[in-house]
Image: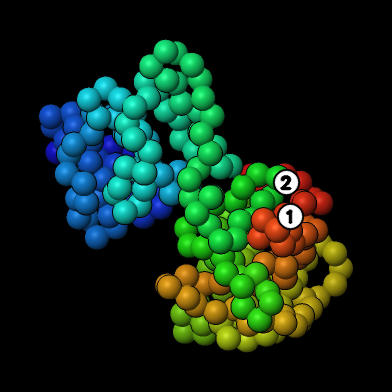
Amino acid sequence: LSVDMYLCYYDGFCRVLNDEQKYGFFDTSGRNVTGFVFDQAEDYSEGLAAVSVSGKWGYMDTDQQMIIPAVYEEASPFKAGFAEVKTTNGELVRLENPIQESRDINIYINEAWLYTEKSPFIESGRTMIPIRSIAEAFGMNVQWIPSASEVILQNSELIIRFQIGSTEASINFFDDGFPSRNVMLDTAPTIFNGRTYIPLRFIAENLGCSVTWEPNSRSVFMTNLWRAPQ
């Protein structure tokens, strides 16, 4: 058994190559969840992994189901909600991530779809989003302090601190000449299905974004006023 990509995990899974040059996927407990059944495989991206079976490519979801059948000659990873595949007649086709269509609420940053490992939801009229997904989209480090139920978000420009269940947060912009300030959230951060959720509008506006809710499509559109997310 040889290890591929230094056991890097994406969406909770890593791809591993065995001595017979077949790929399988392992979860974070070290369990092989697929067997070594793939001729080729790519890392998970936006909840789907491109895999090759009998010379054809398709996409597997995080439940190890072939959500897009293996019928393509080539397949690229999903990015911003889309992937490019090549059909048997050599045509390049752009596929939309099927997870996007299945979501009750979708988030877009500068018109690009934001994949979140868990679905956003609405609580008390506020859209709640998994904090790690949006923080990492803006290049912020996420630190969890279990003893205080505190989350710290930080990049080169600011640091945001908040506690689970508390409507008070602390924000400090570096080099602006002002000390950190306390702000009130209208909905407290919470833990749901093992993920930390925070009100989207609060975190978006403090990351320099305007926020628009589109009720017909149940979509949130964020426009980044500082820079495009990395």
What is the spatial separation of the Cα atoms under label 2 and label 1, in whole angstroms? 6 Å
Q: Mark 2 falls on what kind of element? A: loop
| Circle 2: residue type | Asn
- In the figure, 14 relative to 39: above or below? below
Residue, x 86% and y 68% (percent of image)? 177
- Left or right of residue 20, residue 48 in this image: right
Number of marks in the rendered image? 2
Please tell me which residue is depicted at 34% across the width and 35% down the height of the picture.
69
Q: Is residue 176 visible?
A: yes
Position of residue 194 measured from the top left corner of the image (x, y, whole percent): 42, 72
Circle 1 residues within 10 Å: few <14, some 14–19, many ≥20: many
Q: Give the quadrant of the C terminus.
A: top right
Residue 211: give x, y in percent of width and height: 77, 60
Q: Nearer the viewer, residue 7 or 100?
A: 100
> Residue 114, percent across and down?
59, 51
In the image, what residue type sits under mark 1? Met
Estimate how packed mark 2 is, as few (under 14), some (14 to 19) or many (20 or more) residues with alpha carbons within 10 Å.
some
In the displayed structure, would residue 73 be above or below residue 155?
Answer: above
Q: On the rendered structure, is 107 left or right of 64? A: right
Drawn side of residue 43 relative to residue 16, left or right: right
139 in relation to 97, above or below? below
Q: Residue furthest top?
A: 89
Residue 217 occupies quadrant: bottom right
Tell me whether circle 2 and circle 1 mark residues in contact (CB < 8 Å).
Answer: yes
Query: Which callout, 2 or 1, points at the residue further toward the start of the chain?
Result: 2
Q: Which mark is residue 222?
A: 1
State the residue position of label 2.
110
Q: Quadrant of residue 31?
A: bottom left
